[in-house]
Image (cartoon, rainbow, N blue to C red):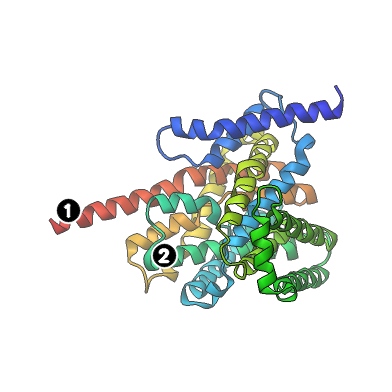
Amino acid sequence: MTPSVAGLDTLLAVVLVAALAPAIVALLPGKIPQVVVLIFGGILIGPQVLGIGHPASISLLSDIGLGFLFLMAGYELEPGQLRQRSGRMAIAGWSASAALAVGIVAVLTATGFVRDFVPIGLALTTTALGTLLPILQDADMLSGDFGKYVLAAGAVGELFPIVAISIFLTRRNEYVAFLSLVAVLGAALLLTAAPHVLGESRLRALVRQGQRATAQTTLRWSIVLLVVLLTLAAHFGLDVVLGAVLAGLVLRRWTNRMGDVQPLENKLEAVGYGIFIPLFFVSSGMTLDVRSIIHNPFRLVVFFVLLLVVRGLPSLLVYARVLPLRERVEMTFITATTMPLLIALAAIGLSDGVMLPSNAAALVGAGVVSVLVFPAVATLLRRSGRSGLSSGQQ
């Protein structure tokens, strides 16, 4: 079998899993996030179960999916929010999580439980804002002050670990990595000035012309922006996740000057969530070392508990003056939910040789369980609080 045929066979299996995932979610009881079904589908078709798909043959498409995932995450980020009270509190919460992670992972390293200190420590400080948004929207948990604190905590839980990855998870020393980070950030700032150079009236005319079905100018340039910053990050020795997030931030600045950007956002979601992002999750499932989890499930349980302790518990103290206890407990479970960035961290750690395969599998497995359990607990607490309030008013 030629490599091209093998790649097509894998691609066919992957797109079938992606197409069937929404129907499977609709048939299953409860509100299981689609990302979980995609990962389990990847495990099923992967080398360890049916052997239908081989992730190496679609690695480029998977990398583009990873880029799109964090492009969309960066697009949703509002850097100005970090200067507000909700942002400052989110930074305080993440800093507390980082301090906890350093201490706990140091103990695990001393006992020989882990040897990959940095990637595991960073993994325990992440939050899956992109995965949480649809769940929290359905539960009406993004309105009011609570929604502001949740969005800020999620933004910090994605952005800060990404910056830390670019500095610490690199084969260069930290000083060179920091200079590389500054260089890529400078390039991103220069790209934000592109609308000024082109002129806002000319830009709006270009957008209106580009909305035609045959032109799609704005969508094409959005993808160019993504690939440019991914390439810059790769050439500077930084992780491409940072480039993808910066692309999303730059694109947000561009669209603020375009006027009506809903058509572009719809197209980005269609291309990203419709095609490339599901490929990334299915490919991640295919690479997951399921055998190591089965042979040592205790490792997964440990990481699952640590996600709640390290990332979640600081919310109980940080938001003590602004949120009641029930909402702080909800925030604890929300901030401890993680998935896409954790998968990316595991992949980076494995490719750089700084993470053990058993730890990578256990971390991803813990992330899958966190997506299944933690948002469900938070929404259940919210519903019980509302029912108690309504019964008290009667």
The quarter in which the N terminus is drawn is top right
Instruction: Tell me where residue 369 appears, x and y as whole percent.
Output: 51, 42
Neighbourhood count class around disc 2 (C-alpha, 10 Å): few under 14, some 14–19, many 20 upward: many
Q: Which amino acid is tagged 2?
A: Leu
Name the secondary structure under disc 2: helix
112 is higher (above) or lower (below) than 296:
below
Q: Which amino acid is tagged 1?
A: Ser
As drawn, is 313 to the left or to the right of 321?
A: right
Q: Which mark is residue 316?
A: 2
Report if residue 302 is visible in the image.
yes
As drawn, is 156 to the left or to the right of 210?
A: left
* Depth check, front residue: 72 or 329: 72
Q: Which residue is mark 1?
A: 391
How far apart marks 1 and 2 lie (CA) works out to: 26 Å
Mark nearer the viewer, 1 or 2: 1
Report if residue 43 is visible in the image.
no
Instruction: Tell me where residue 258 appears, x and y as whole percent.
Output: 62, 67
* Depth check, front residue: 50 or 281: 281
Q: Are marks 1 and 2 in contact (CB under 8 Å)?
A: no
Q: Within the image, what quadrant is residue 250 found in? A: bottom right
39 is higher (above) or lower (below) than 118:
above
Q: Which mark is residue 235?
A: none
283 is higher (above) or lower (below) than 233:
above
* Depth check, front residue: 164 or 379: 379
Instruction: Tell me where residue 97 appears, x and y as whole percent.
Output: 55, 64
